[in-house]
Amino acid sequence: MNYQELSINEIKESKFNPSTRTDKTSAKYKHLRTNIKANGLIVPLVVSKNFTLIDGHRRYNCLKDLKVETAPVIIHTKVTNKTYDKFFVAANES
């Protein structure tokens, strides 16, 4: 795994992420956006080698809403096209 800053524009959302998790009208989403605005991003996003989000879709969307240009990410180098689904589910089981 590698840690680095990426441009928000380089990060790709997963098509498998349920839209309910990034519902901008939900209280959880609004609370997270307020928290990120006040404190910055505390937990980095997790992406695959091709910069597809594995974990952090809500955080990513909050950053976009707040017009943040870069985000700290952990690039999970062991994720491949064949294993992406497994990692995505494991990171989003809650």
Image (tube, rainbow, N blue to C red):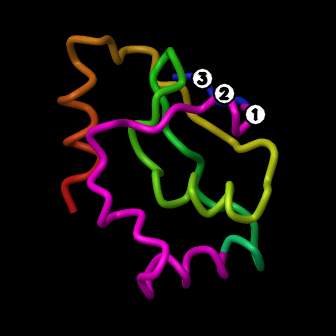
Asked if the residue under mark 3 is in contact with the one under mark 1, i.e. CB atoms within 8 Å, the reply is: no
Residue on which disc 3 sits: 2
- Amino acid at pointer 1: Ser
Instruction: Decide: is 57 above or below 73.
Output: below
Is tag 2's residue or tag 3's residue first in the polypeptide sequence?
3
Asked if the residue under mark 1 is in contact with the one under mark 2, i.e. CB atoms within 8 Å, the reply is: yes
The residue shown at (51%, 16%) is: 50
Asked if the residue under mark 3 is in contact with the one under mark 2, i.e. CB atoms within 8 Å, the reply is: no
Crowding around mark 1 (Cα neighbors within 10 Å: few <14, some 14 to 19, many 20+) is few
Instruction: Decide: is 71 above or below 93.
Output: above
Q: Secondary structure at mark 3?
A: strand
Query: What's the CA distance linking mark 2 and mark 3?
Result: 16 Å
The residue shown at (79%, 57%) is: 67
In this view of the protein, which residue sits in the foreground, 40 or 66?
66
What's drawn in magenta, residue-wise?
6-35
Image quadrant of residue 71? top right
- Amino acid at pointer 3: Asn
Q: Is residue 43 left or right of residue 90?
A: right
Q: Position of residue 30 (x, y in %)?
A: 55, 82
Image quadrant of residue 64? bottom right
Tell me if residue 88 is in the magenta stretch.
no
Q: Secondary structure at mark 1?
A: strand
The residue shown at (72%, 31%) is: 6
- Amino acid at pointer 2: Glu
